[in-house]
Amino acid sequence: MTDAPLLDAWRAAKAREGHSMQIPGHKMRYGKSASDPFAPDLLDEVIRDDIPLQGGADDNVFSGRVLEKAEALWAEAIEADHARFLLGGSTQGNIAALTSVVAPGVTICIDRTSHRSAHAGLVTSGADPCWILPRIHPDFGVPIGVHAGDIDMSGAYALFVTSPAYVGTMTNIRALADLCHAQDSVLIVDQAWGAHLDFLPGRGAHAHGADVVTTSVHKALTGYSQTAVTSLKGSRVLPSTLTHGVDLTATTSPSATLLASIEATRLAMQRDGSARLALMSEAVHDARMALSRIAGVVALTDELLGCEMDPLKLTLFVPETGTTGARIAAELWQRGVGVEAADADTLIMTVTIADDPDTLADVVSLLEGVIESQRGPARSPAPAATWQIQPDVVMTPRAAYFAHRRRMPLRDAVGQVSTEQFCPYPPGVPLLAPGERVSEEVVEAIGAAGRMTRMAYCSDPTAKTIEVVADATVR
Ligand SMILES: Cc1ncc(COP(=O)(O)O)c(C=O)c1O
């Protein structure tokens, strides 16, 4: 096996001469003719690197098996037993994992603050969720991990948690793995934000005993947007079982360009990853120290939170500056710096191996200036409702999703059962999910979050109306 079978095949396909009589419709004609009316914007710009897997990097019958080989090399690199590359992000990974591992009527303990894709996976799998909640830090209002002692796994076939959380806090996966494996249950971890952890010895979820793990290669590592990997370790879930879920949710026309970027990321990590991760972890540590010297700013650390924190996540808590994370983020955006997420109290920044310490230091001084320009009297924290949800569950997500629906004003829907998700995005955790009763508090929270950020995945983009269960018979 070569070092990079998929990437090599992608390069060979790019250099190959000939004429394609198959998809993709653009025929990979980039760079071939300057007079081509499609050339300037389309062929030579936005799709200039697009090579399909089928009839591109591999032939139509996949005789080169380049994807399979690349997936095996990824699994080996992260010390897993099996891996599948995904082009639908960790969204696809979560839906695929849930649809593979659980089934209608099977109980799964699952963190209610999971990303919307995990809630979607409950609709596709039909499993019965037993909702659990992470602990919340009393001062900073952010999740600080799911605790094994808070979970009753009796009767549950699987446990689903997210680590790192959106804010960078991590769960003690070893304790959860022990809890699950004592009764031969499956631990599924959404590690969408922690792809880099798999390349830090002993830090990734598999290293702590997780059975199925999904990571976004495009988030904490350097893959094309949409790229992710779902992987298996141990024998509780068979590769063929995970494959059912992956194939159920995958396109039949995968882009070898996107897939090869996963392999190129692995190569980069194996060549230079440890040094870059060490360099940037140090830079984040320095940035946290520097930012904490700004009056009123708290940069969250392991010590402050009492739980492990992603070494590359920079999360600030700002109420005492008098301004909000959202106002700081808006000003930074005007100045060319996009941050991962912001709400009233927090500002979250993602640092990767593609950053460098000098750029990070520049962002720190920019932040200092912006905060000073917005400084006001210290205010009380206004924690995001996202992490505080206490759902009133009436029926399974699947039963609600497939029930007959009727639309009504959200304000009038208190007491009704939702068929849909209302997700402030980011972080994409539903404030209200299918099967949950609408309450006054939830209506308030949706209104407040909608003033701060985009309210996504509800059928009415204004979030003024809602589709509720009209009757629970299947549509
Ligand atoms: C915790 C978590 N899981 C899954 C996802 C979905 O990842 P992707 O955007 O790669 O589909 C996200 C997206 O932000 C997320 O925050």
Image (cartoon, grey):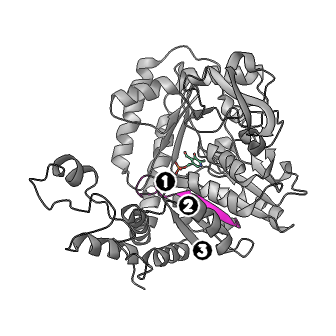
Q: As rendered, which of 6 and 390 lies closer to the eye?
A: 6
Task: Check if residue 8 falls in the magenta segment.
Answer: no
The residue under the point 36% across, 51% down is 356
First to last magenta residue range: 209-225
Report if the CB atoms under discs 2 and 3 are less than 8 Å apart: no
Q: Earlier in the sequence, mark 2 or mark 1?
A: 2
> Which element type, helix, strand or loop, lies under badge 1?
loop
> Residue 148: image x %, image y %?
81, 54
> Residue 383: image x %, image y %?
66, 27
Q: Which residue is mark 1?
A: 220
Report if the CB atoms under discs 2 and 1 are less than 8 Å apart: yes
The Cα–Cα distance between marks 2 and 3, rounded to whole angstroms, is 17 Å
The residue under the point 71% across, 31% down is 405
What amino acid is at disc 2?
A: Leu
Report if the CB atoms under discs 1 and 3 are less than 8 Å apart: no
| Above-or-below relation of 84 to 2 | above
Task: Check if residue 217 falls in the magenta segment.
Answer: yes
> Which element type, helix, strand or loop, lies under badge 3?
strand
**Within the image, what quadrant is residue 421 found in?**
top right
Observer-side mark, 1 or 3, equals 3
**Badge number at residue 197:** 2
Rate crowding at label 1 as few (under 14), some (14 to 19) or many (20 or more) other CA atoms within 10 Å: many
Rate crowding at label 3 as few (under 14), some (14 to 19) or many (20 or more) other CA atoms within 10 Å: many
Residue 292 seen in the current view: no
> Which element type, helix, strand or loop, lies under badge 2?
helix
Q: Which residue is mark 3?
A: 82
Disc 1 Cβ-to-ligand 1 distance below 8 Å? no
Q: As rendered, which of 383 and 69 lies closer to the eye?
A: 69
